[in-house]
Amino acid sequence: MKKLARLLIFVLLALVLHSQQTLASAKSFAQEDQPTPTYSSWIITSTPNPDGSIVHIVQEGETLWDISLAYGVPGAEIMGNSGNSPTVTDVYVGQVLIIRPPNPSTQTPTLTSTPTRITPQATLLRPTLTPIPTQTLFTTLTPTDQPNVLVRVFADTHTVGIAMVSISSVGILLVLIFGFFKKGK
């Protein structure tokens, strides 16, 4: 009976290790093949500046993929707007990414001189100066609600499916083993 209990414990440990290896290999395979969509609403998105531009400063744990999903803008476009190669996907903490460039400014017409007859006048006309718009490089961060822990856990359906299959196979194995114990007595 002790040998059978040891065998059962060994089989259970082997199943647990196998399921962890399966999960790890599935995650690494998914990361190598293509980025898996994640629940990226935890990223604090920036509000547009008065000129229409949107600038994002990369925080710890953020990836270009997550930022792209949060703003709904392709990663290649974000990198191109920021002056980087569109094929680059690496971002670093503190990097300033331009999500949307400023709207094109409207040209204000300049005064042009027209030939007129010179007549003496008491006052001279002076053209008015039009202020030049400036760009703001700092963003105003708008906090968003953090998603529920269960929503974040179950957002990756591939991992949840593998975990459910592993747990079910352990349960079936236990039923089979204990079913043979009763028949053996």
Image (spheres, grey):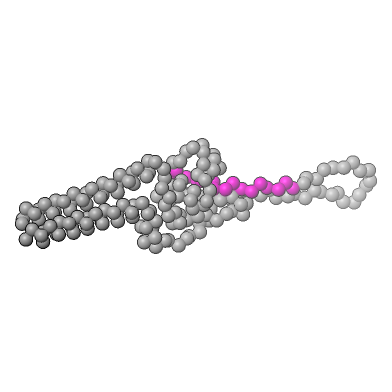
Observer-nearest of 150 and 128? 150
Residue 16 picture location, percent across and down: 22, 52
Is 175 a magenta residue?
Answer: no
**Point 44% across, 43% down: residue:** 91
Provide the residue span drawn in magenta.
91-108
Q: Is residue 82 visible?
A: no
Query: Which quadrant is home to the C terminus?
Result: bottom left
The reply to whether the magenta stretch includes residue 100 is yes
Q: Is residue 160 left or right of residue 77?
A: left
Q: Nearer the viewer, residue 109 or 98?
A: 98
- Find the residue positioned furthest to the front: 183
In this rendering, the count of numbered labels is: 0
What residue is at 28 percent from the left and 47 percent from the top? 22
Left or right: 56 with respect to 122? left
- Judged left or right of residue 98, residue 90 is left
Percent coordinates x, y for residue 53 in the rendering: 59, 50
The residue depicted at 10 percent of the width and 61 percent of the height is 182
Question: In the rendered image, which quarter contains the N terminus?
Answer: bottom left
Residue 149, image quadrant: bottom left
Residue 115 visible from this viewpoint: yes
| Residue at 22% from the left image edge and 58% from the top image edge | 171
Which residue is at the front of the view, 152 or 158? 158
In screen coordinates, is 103 left or right of 46?
right
Q: Position of residue 150 (x, y in %)?
A: 36, 61
Principal secondary structure, stretch drawn in magenta:
loop
Estimate the x, y position of residue 165 in percent, counting from the top left: 29, 54
Viewer-closest of 142 and 27: 27
Whether 108 is drawn above or below 150: the answer is above
